[in-house]
Amino acid sequence: MAPLHTDRAFEQHLGTVRASILEMGGLVEDQIALAMRALVERDVALARTVVDRDHTVNRFDVEIDALCLKALALHQPAARDLRLVTTALKITTDLERIGDLAVQVAERAIELAETPPVKPYIDLPRMAERARDMVHRSLDAFVREDAELALAVCAADDEIDKLHEQLFRELLSFMVEKPDTITRAMRLLFVSKSLERVGDHATNIAEMVIFMVKGRDIRHLDAVPRDL
């Protein structure tokens, strides 16, 4: 897609913003995967690595915000270019929060590592993979300015919500039938909720991409639109 302006310096600045967001997104995706692997493999050292790397996610958040504010100050973009920069500012907030959620999963992995599992880890890795895919596709939609892909990400959130509800019911039955599993089951519920929230943040990013491209705000609608 051709740029809407002729300022080469501004286009290079936007390229730096896009590249930085993709790098931050890749790190966050990796954090989700490593946190889940730490849980499944009961790997405390790996879980602590996830916790320790969160400062890198936070550094990206600060640096990208600074790039965006500099773009606003130096180039005073308008219309779609302005929406792109303000969308980038919001995306970094969601990515930083996803990073925090990956840390929460890693912390639960540390707590659960020394106790026998309540049940085989099947649903949680599936949720993590779905959530990670949503994050990846939402960022792909941002870079490609692809509103249809962003809309597909929004629709995918229902699957993660259903997996969370299913796991909630299953773990609740464990807690009722075997009270000695309550602490472990609650920690798994926290993991499930964290992954469900990752899906919510990926949806936030996708909704902002739709606004950036189409100028249409679909937040807070009762249902995801079928088309744009």
Image (cartoon, rainbow, N blue to C red):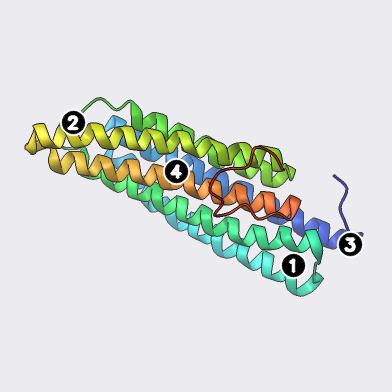
- Between the residue at mark 4 and the residue at mark 3, the CA separation in whole angstroms equals 36 Å
Circle 1: residue type? Ala
Q: Position of residue 213 (x, y in %)?
A: 74, 50
Q: Is residue 116 left or right of residue 206?
A: left
Disc number placed over residue 71 in the picture, else none? 1
- Between the residue at mark 3 and the residue at mark 1, the CA separation in whole angstroms equals 12 Å
The residue where tag 4 is placed is 31
- Between the residue at mark 1 and the residue at mark 2, the CA separation in whole angstroms equals 51 Å
Q: Is residue 75 left or right of residue 139?
A: right
Counting other residues with Cα less than 10 Å from the Cα at mark 4, is it few (<14), some (14-19), or many (20 or more)? many
Circle 3: residue type? Asp
Q: Position of residue 153 (x, y in %)?
A: 58, 39
Of labels 2 and 3, the one closer to you: 2
Judged from the image, the secondary structure of the residue bearing numbered disc 2 is: loop
Q: Could you tell me which quadrant the N terminus lies in?
A: top right
Disc number placed over residue 139 in the picture, else none? none
Front-most of residues 83 and 30: 83
Q: Position of residue 30 (x, y in %)?
A: 48, 40
Circle 4: residue type? Gln
Residue 97 vertical placement versus 137 (above, below): below
Front-most of residues 192 and 14: 192
Front-most of residues 209 and 165: 165
* Mark before the other along the chain sequence, 3 or 1: 3
Residue at the location (61% across, 47% down)?
206
Disc number placed over residue 118 in the picture, else none? 2
Circle 2: residue type? Val
The residue where tag 3 is placed is 7
Asked whether disc 2 touches disc 3, contact meaning CB atoms under 8 Å apart, the reply is no
Q: Quadrant of residue 227?
A: top right
Judged from the image, the secondary structure of the residue bearing numbered disc 1 is: helix
